[in-house]
Amino acid sequence: MQSEYHYEYTECDSKGTRWRVAVPHTQGLCTGLPDPVKGTECSFSCAAGQYLDMAVQECTPCGKGTYSLGTGVHFEEWTELPHGFKSVSNNAYGTEYGNCSRSQWEARGEYVASNTDECTATLMYSVTLKQEGTISFEYLYPDRNIVFEFFVQNNQCQPREENSRWMKTTEKGWGYHQVKLTKGTNVLYWRTMAFNMGNNGLKPVLLRNILITGAAYTSECFQCKPGTFAPSTGTSFCDLCPPNTFSYHGAVSCIPCESDKYSVAGSAVCTLRPPCTDKDYFYTHMPCDANGETQLIYKWIEPKICNDTMEGAKVLPVSGIKIECPPCNPGFHQSNTTICEPCPHGMFSNGTICRECPVGTQAALGFEYKWWNTLPSNMGSTVMSGINFEYQREAGGWEVAGDYVYTSGGSSDNDYMILTLNVPAFSSQQQLTEFGESNEVSRITFVFDMKCSVNCQLFFMKATDMDVSSLIESWNGTRDKQSYSHHLKSDVNTTFSWAFQRTSVRTDGGRKYTADVAKIYSINITNVKDGVASWCQPCALGTDSQCISCPSGHYIDMRTSSCISCPKNTYLPSHLIFGEESCTECGPGTKNNDVHSLCYNDCHFSISEGRRKLQYDFSLLQNITTVTGKPSFTSRGVKFYHQFSISLCGHQGKKLATCTQNVSDTQGLENEPRPSVNSYVCQSVIIPSQATGQSNLMSSQPIVLADQMIGVTTETTLAQISSPVDLFPGEDAGIKDIIFYYRSKEVTQSCVFGRATTIRLRCNPQKKGQGTVSVPSNCSEGTCDGCVFHFLWETEQACPLCTANDFHIITSACQHGIQKTTAVWLKPQLCVGGIDLPPQTISICKTPDFWLKVGVISGICAAIMLTALTGYFWKKNRKLEYNYSRLMMNAPSKEGELPAADSCAIMEGEDAEDELLYSPRHSILRKFISLTEKRTSDGFDCVPLKSSEHMDM
């Protein structure tokens, strides 16, 4: 019987012929089979919508409810992996990092999804083509932290030469990719690997609608899948059933749902309509009519899935009364029509009447949206399904409500409500450029709140030049009314997006959390080219009384309308340009750059310590320095590091530290733009090359830690940023650490004041050259709270410059008549550079032997002189005693009787030089003095003699 076998062709021979043979369904059945017959030519094929009827070997049109691709095969149902597909996985980092058997591609109904962990998951399919063909598929690839590649190999496992095997990330929904296939065996590979370094919620790669062409024929037609139909014969595809209809396999037409049921487009079943509740409708404002009036109206959320005729069901509320329209948004005015139109160039408005800017002022261009009667022309709203990630054009997403715009309901609670704002270009009048680096070009500020009963999320994203959107910030759960600002530094086409999702849990329809909403009250973006103005700002006037732009670092003097340079050690923020008070004073230890756009440290610092002034020179530390923290590990044990790039000082404040995500390099997309950040300090996640199998390190997730220098000081707190001493113990009491303070302007959900960074420079003579940089031992990622990052930089270059107080003089002993004087640094030497040690000096000196000889000779001479004097005075004394005794012998015998004649007591024959004293009771010294004082001019000594009268008296 024919039901017991089927026909197949043999392989083509060298002549290009083949045979049709019958193959039994049951192994071993060999009787009753038709004889082999010569088959069609090997190049034979059927057109799309036809199949090869093997019984007659002719192409036959497919019947109704079926389709065929002619020479191809189509995979569009993914309730399970289709026959021939295989998912394999392994750990690229090594088996020691865990088992990857559960990291597979998973079929999820309308698509197949990749893994989101560090394992390598590969989806494979092998097909043999009789002629050249193609492989095409749709894919969704939103996350740069997943590597996604597609490639083809032949039956010798040799890869096909393709321009690029690495897939580009997608932005607006599903992407499309097609590759040519060669005749013969082709093995198709879809491979992914995630870099989940502490990130939660990575989005998987999704595949659907895989189409392969190049098979010579198909021997059967395929039934249309449920939710589709084919109303005619010979079709190559099936149509989707419209909303509120359904179909079974092989449907020729779709069956309408019963009145109490509903379905979305492409449904296989109808769902019972629940009673309508207040979650099934939303409110919005009608555009202003010719009378300048509007009203609040209510609408059913599309598609309508509830029944408002059931008992207890909510009915659509009655529309509100008409009220006067709110004014136009600032910078717009209402013309004769009901439409708000922008004010002409050079004019401004508060939303009513346009007025010319006064002389000496100019329009401050931008957009300020605070009245929401209609969405502005450069804004849009849509809904992206959280199930198949298709954009649903019929749904609004965000609705206007007068004072705010808010999220309405979608088809499902996990749909994304998306609001977009496009700005083609920004004005460059206030753009400051330093060494090719742009300062703040614009600033976007919006006010919002969130009301959530479950874990809803609001994402704020930015896309430049039609590139993939990058996440700027996100918020979870209920949020009070608050403001958020983001600074822009590039004058490029920019699209901002707000995406609200009520729950990330997949649901197949139903609206439980429609009351969870996000509201945006106002959006203000500055410095927009071809924007509108709500006010006029003073400007500097040229010689022709026309507004001119001030040079960088100059503010506008309100009295004279002239450009004045900011004072020394101040800088001018790009969004402030009026009056000297706009010039902001630099922090301690910093100075302004040449264009007064920022403050920086020129790698020099000084501080007074008592009577001593310490000078520092950090010039050798101004080059980029990279420091890697201690290793961290993922949930699977994969090692990764946090790497920091530091630009400490100098270079006129240019931010030289760069952190880059180089995943595109590993994907062979070297020419693709690489996400990167430039700052004073930045961080990226580094994965070792031996773990990734790549020749270079894998770098991802770059973030800015410091883009503004606050100051340099020895204090442990500056501008509410603290650098606790206990994070890095061991500070020298005599030489304090020099601390550099930085701040990042970008605020985050957890860091409401932005991130901050402190870098301690510690004098360590043992650390030569640039020394070493380390993070706190108890905070291996450089931060203990996720907001303030701390670093310790130990180096001899952090020591103060040497002065005369840092050395002392040593004088050597005199040897061989030579004496040396040498300068020696104090120990430990806590200084570097500065002055040099004085050179050694040599002087002639007298040895101790010489002075001993001088002393001995002097002593001998003194002894001789003393001996001579002693003899001389002894002789004198003897003569004086003799003369005195003679005088006493010649004295009268009677008391009071005078001698016969005056006499000098010099007898004949006596020496006239002999001395004569008054009394023997006088000392020899006295005699000597008398001799010198009483001697007359003729050389005799006179001794007066008392008369007897005087003696009697």
Image: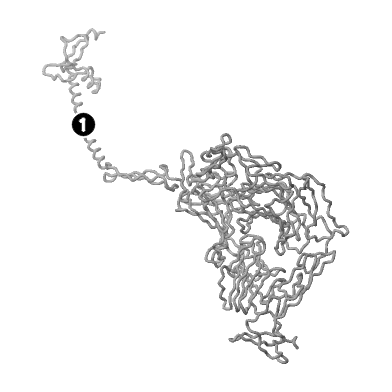
Residue placed most toward the observer, 400 or 277: 400
Colour logic: one colour
- Is residue 371 among what the camera can see? yes
Total numbered labels placed on residues in the image? 1
Image point (21%, 28%), residue name: 869
Q: Which residue is mark 1?
A: 865
13 on left or right of 902: right
With 310 as the anchor, is 601 left or right in this view? left
Give the SS element for disc 1. helix
Q: Residue 131, position in %: x, y?
A: 61, 78
Lateral position of residue 280 relative to residue 782, left or right: right
Up-down relation of residue 54 to residue 231 (above or below): below
Instruction: State which quarter of the image contains the N terminus.
Output: bottom right
> Furthest-front residue in view?
336
Q: Outermost residue, right direction? A: 311
Q: Quadrant of residue 309?
A: bottom right
Residue flagged by tag 1: what amino acid is it?
Answer: Met
The front one of 898 and 357 is: 357
For residue 641, say whether it is visible. Answer: no
- In the rendered image, the quadrant that contains the C terminus is top left
Q: Going by the picture, which residue comes out furthest to the left?
A: 909
Q: Relative to the observer, which residue lies in front, 77 or 395?
A: 395
Position of residue 7 measured from the top left corner of the image (x, y, whole percent) = 70, 85
Residue 419 point in image, percent of width and height? 69, 54
Counting from the top left corner in percent of width and height, residue 259 is at 85, 64
Number of other residues with Cα within 10 Å of mark 1, as a class: few under 14, some 14 to 19, many 20 or more = few
Res. 852 image quadrant: top left
